[in-house]
Image: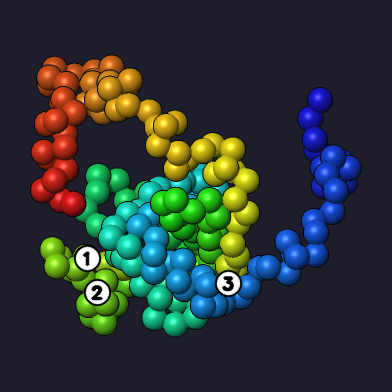
Amino acid sequence: MQVRSLTELRTLYASARERSVKKELHALDAHCTRFVALSPLVIVASSASHLALDASPRGGAPGFVKVPDAHTLLIPDAPGNNRLDTLENILQTGQIGLLFLLPGVDETLRVNGTAILSTAADDLQQCADPKRAPKLVIRVHVQAAYLHCAKALMRSALWDATRHVARSVMPSMGEMMKDQIGGDLPAETQAEMLQRYAQDL
């Protein structure tokens, strides 16, 4: 069996409660702004023109995402793997979805809107940190913002230290990539990877 219509889908669920509908804002209020200022991690969702979807994490010191005004977010682009999946998607469709997380807080903040890739001097300066100024900034125009309930993170117990997985239960990234793509290079150990990453953090 497969659900094939909105009517079929809705028969499986009750209607959304009034507060769940009304909580969607069209701009960032004081609570949303505070959430962004405290958040060290945002998941960025984007789509290519042929509807291929992508989600990518962006992290930094709390407040690394700037809020110049209630309708704007600035996300600095830090050094990464240079695939540029998110940036290419933004060029193609200009659409973006964001999920902000706060360590220890089970609620999350969802923001949807449009985005451009900005190299404006003021945007770069606002997003500069003691180590570097970004090459570009993802400038987001906020169209919808709302606080997402805590149930998913409560179910996952994401912040419960007793449930955390020791890094040693998985091979290093280098070892997994060697298995996945082969090649003659030796598998990079976890320690070697961390040493290499430290140069770009």
Q: Secondary structure at mark 1?
A: loop
Tell me the residue that label 2 is attached to: 124
Vertical comparison of 183 with 115: above or below: above
For the residue pair 18 and 150, the one nearer the viewer reads as 150
Are the residues at dot 3 and dot 2 in contact (C-beta closer than 8 Å)? no
Q: Secondary structure at mark 3?
A: strand
Q: Amino acid at mark 1?
A: Pro
Position of 36 with respect to 18 (left or right) is left
Q: Quadrant of residue 179?
A: top left
Q: Residues within 10 Å of mark 1 (few under 14, many from 20)?
A: some
Residue 81: x and y in percent read: 25, 44
Mark sitting earlier along the chain (2/1): 2
Residue 20: x and y in percent read: 73, 61
Q: Residues within 10 Å of mark 3 (few under 14, many from 20)?
A: some
Are the residues at dot 2 and dot 1 in contact (C-beta closer than 8 Å)? yes
Measure the C-alpha gap from mark 3 to mark 2. 23 Å
Q: Amino acid at mark 3?
A: Gln
Determine the residue positioned at 38% across, 54% down: 41
Q: Secondary structure at mark 2?
A: helix
Q: Residues within 10 Å of mark 2 (few under 14, many from 20)?
A: many
Position of 142 with respect to 42 (left or right) is right
Q: Quadrant of residue 29?
A: bottom right
Position of 65 with respect to 28 (left or right) is left
Res 99 label: none
Vertical comparison of 132 with 101: above or below: below
Tell me the residue that label 1 is attached to: 134
Tell me the residue that label 3 is attached to: 143
Q: Amino acid at mark 2?
A: Leu
Q: Quadrant of the N terminus?
A: top right
Determine the residue positioned at 14% across, 30% down: 191
Measure the C-alpha gap from mark 2 to mark 1. 6 Å
